[in-house]
Amino acid sequence: MERDALIRSLVEAIRMLTHAELVDYSGHCSARRDGDSFYINSGASIRSTLTAADIVAIDFDGELREGTARPPLEFPLHAEIYRARPDVRVVMHTHPKWSTLLTMVGAPFRPVFPQGALLGDVPVLDSPLSVNTRDMGARAATALGAGRALLLKSHGAVVVGADMIEGFALAIYLEENASRQYMAMQIGSPYVFSDAEQEVCRARLGSPALFRTASLRPLAVDSRAALPASAPAPPRLRRGYERHSRSAGLQPCSWTVR
Ligand SMILES: [Zn+2]
């Protein structure tokens, strides 16, 4: 993806994750720029109204390659994952309520609905402290291993993807699974998908087309989510968006993630 489109997709992903209440005033997401640098929102940026001007490019030591604003203090979280995982092209660091709640009481994240199976069992970094040093970043990357998500104890979540849509959808699925798991725990013992059932779900649900459809949800549930117009979405996607936006009382607008 060329530079401007990549930055635009990153901006839109962060804004949508903010409106979905997964990113708060201090979350950050990034997109790999090349072998040793990445784009990320600046530390002081207002996430809910982010623009391309809030994106900087830094290397793995935090040195600016593009832009002048300061990167977030937790940039080593992204840097060390990119260093350890050449397959990763986006890293989402969110502060989601339900996923984090599970870590507060030591309840393991378990796949309890089909899309949750795309994440499987999610490991937990056993520290609530900020991932703001190379050492902490390396610990997080090790805890993540070859997986798609990591929970940070009493702090937040990290989701990685091969592209923006995948990272975005998995960030949504992670929190959706956690909220359903939490609610099920209030009335009983949630059913956890077996390994074989998870395999089936992964084979059926791990497609970019379904990720796009799922990604509409945070827009649909938040009446404040009025994103600036960008390139028109494909017809099928637009129909889905318009249906969701009408039911949420929104004015349909164009939408792309990449
Ligand atoms: Zn954080």
Image (cartoon, rainbow, N blue to C red):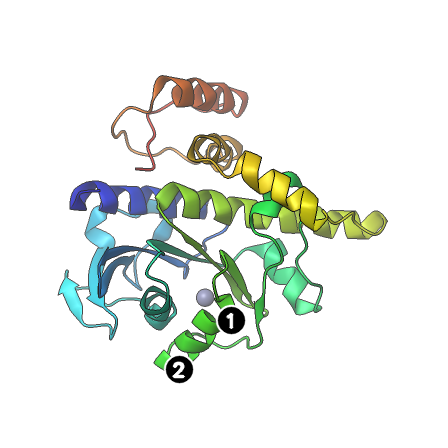
Q: Mark 2 points at which residue?
A: 135
Residue 134 in which image quadrant = bottom left
Q: Name the residue under label 1.
A: 143
Q: How crowded is mark 1: few (under 14 residues within 10 Å), some or many (20 or more)?
A: some
Q: Is residue 125 above or below residue 194?
A: below
Residue appearing at x 35%, y 71% in the figure = 80
Quadrant location, the C terminus: top left
Q: Is residue 212 above or below residue 196?
A: above
- Foreground mark, 2 or 1? 1
Counting from the top left corner in percent of width and height, residue 241 is at: 44, 24
Q: Is mark 1 on a helix, strand or loop?
A: helix
Q: Is tag 2's residue or tag 1's residue first in the polypeptide sequence?
A: 2
Ligand 1, by image quadrant, is bottom left
Q: Is residue 252 above or below residue 172?
A: above
Circle number at residue 121: none
Residue 19 in which image quadrant = top left
Number of callouts in the render?
Answer: 2
Counting from the top left corner in percent of width and height, residue 55 is at: 23, 55
- Residue 21 seen in the figure: no
Amino acid of disc 1: Ala
